[in-house]
Image (cartoon, coloured by chain):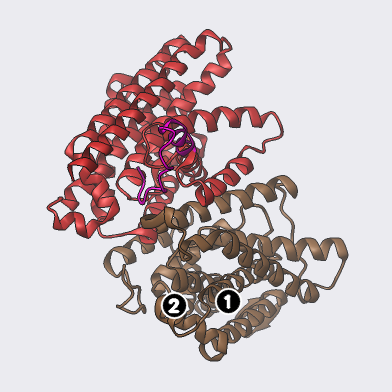
Amino acid sequence: MLLIDLTVNGLIIGLFYALMAIGLSLIFGILRIVNFAHGEFYMIGAYAYTLIALFFGISPWLTLPCAFIAGMALGWATERLLMRPLYSGYASWGVMKDEYAVIITFALSLLLINLVDKVIGPNGYRGPSLVATTRVEIGPFMASGHRLMAAGIALLVLIAVGLFVRYSYWGRQIQAVAQNRLGASLAGIDTAKASSIVFALSGGLAALAGALLSPIINATPDVGAFPAVKSYVIVVLGGMGSIPGAAVASLILGVLESFGAVYISYGYRDTFGLVILIMVLLFRPHGLFGERSREV
Amino acid sequence: MAVIFNDTRMRDRIQLVFSLGIFALVALLPAIVRNEYWQGVLIVSMYFAMLAAAWNLLAGYTGQFSLAPAAFGMIGAYVTGLLSYHFNAPPLVGIPAAVVVAAAIGFGLGRIVLRLRGPYLALTTLSFAEICRLVISNSIEITRGDLGLNVPGIFDHRLTWYYVMLGVLVVIQLGLYFLLRAPAGLYLRAIRDDEIAAASRGVKIVLWKTNAFTLSAAISGLAGALYGHFAQFVSPELGLLSQTGIIVSMVVIGGLATLPGPIGGAFLVYVASEFLRDFGGYQLIVFALLVIIFARFFREGLWGFFRRAIERPGRRPAPAPSAAE
């Protein structure tokens, strides 16, 4: 019975990880960079949800879209202001594009953490629950009502994003740019717009994850660090740039962690994911499901 | 070919003269700065200057963008700290041991990440740094975890510390200059600019990448060990990612892939952050913003402004160089 409980809880956590990891994977696919400020998109979402609900007293159902929009705005601004040199003929970084991306996203992460720390303060805020029910029992499995509702929303959003990227007009443009930026632009696709859409979408998804988890994990300035590290592990495990890979790897990591926290040491819990990350990068750099063609 | 060679040497020489100028200025500072606290601030800046110079060798000159410089500083500090805590080893044993251990770990990491580039390298070194920190803060029986270790001091006088640290920093800087002047300097830069092209011209990629990692780690370990004895205390906080962020911001603000950049950047950033601390702790916000602005618009950092100022007037301003010099 414990097995079922652990598995279902792991899958639920995995859904939230997937919200983060898919955005990160989309960004990697389209720009070939790792966004080290991804955790801060999550943090902004958590704060937007918590603080708007707290100060304006609106129903959490209305603040949830606000958090998503806040994340989208931040993601869009990041791309518009900071990522353009990566592909728009800004010559002086020339050969060191990767380094530029690391510096700029790393600095952005430091900036947002400390800005929020100064403006809002280091104390945690707890987000309001979406549903009042505190305990739902389905056979051997138990969870709070909010956790189940949030997992349901996450699942619906993930399916919507999958359909959007796979079938919609913009989604297909994004796929084209991810496969070959030059080829896509020759075919008349606005690559800059595709990049903006990807960043806005990733920011929104990460912010949504932050909002949905804020009743469980308090919003603090550095709350983004742990989901960010998890999503690095997931994206590497699933193959950088692969969206189905990221989704499956999220669920795998969620279940592994839920078992690991019970059966393996708690103190070293965070190191296991990082060791997995290094091992995958060394021995299977294209990830478990990544395409071989993506070069390392 | 020969012309380019001479040009690089010339630039390196000008840059060395500039960094020696910075050192001379710092050597004279205690005449004005009599306050022990501010002398301590300058000593800590020298610790950061060593780390920044080591990281610059790896990231700026070799193009290996590691996110683990602070971790190597922490490793160095803990080696000498643990030796003196458990075995009462004197600093004369502890510091060389710290250099050797950090170099060995740097060698290992360098071998592991040989094939990785760009974002993959950044993620691997970042995970390595976090693993080191988590292991140290969780091995409570050995390291006392987050409580940290007390380390014996070496010198009683703060000024002695001041000039010893400055001396070590000068030796490191001269060493880096002679390394860059030697063929090795060209190998490293060739690897940074185009690994495949460098290999096809006979540069031993594996050897020189590993050398760069080992040397950078050794310098960081030395810096960490000296800092541990100066502060008389080491804790896992030395290896926090925000420390890496500070080191990166020093190099980017001063000028990546230049000799005086990391040194000047370290002094400016650390001293300025002590000033800003009095105004409500806005230092990290200011530096993160500065790094973004410099990286986005002034790729060459502060050194770029100097370079343009000392270039002969009348000549057309050179277009921004393609790689780094």
Three-letter amino acid code of the residue under disc 2: Ala
**Magenta: predominant secondary structure element?**
loop
Chain B shade in the render: red
Q: What is the chain identity of the residue bearing mark 1?
A: A
Give the camera-side residue of A195 and B210.
Answer: A195
Residue on which disc 1 sits: A12
Residue on which disc 2 sits: A178
Q: Which of marks 1 and 2 is in front?
A: 2
The image shows residue B207 at horizontal and vertical percentages of 17, 48
Count up the numbered dots. Answer: 2
Residue A118: image quadrant is: top right
Secondary structure of residue under mark 1: helix
Chain A shade in the render: brown
Residue B60: image quadrant is: top left
Secondary structure of residue under mark 2: helix
Three-letter amino acid code of the residue under disc 1: Ile
Q: Can residue A132 be seen in this view?
A: no
Density class for disc 1 (Cα within 10 Å; few <14, some 14-19, many ≥20) is many
Give the camera-side residue of A3 and B221.
Answer: B221
Q: What is the chain identity of the residue bearing mark 2?
A: A
Where, quadrant-wise, is the C terminus of chain B in this rendering? top left
- Highlighted magenta segment, given as a residue range: B302-325
The image shows residue A160 at horizontal and vertical percentages of 60, 86
Is-magenta flag for residue B303?
Answer: yes
Mark 1 and mark 2 lie on one chain; the one further toward the N terminus is: 1
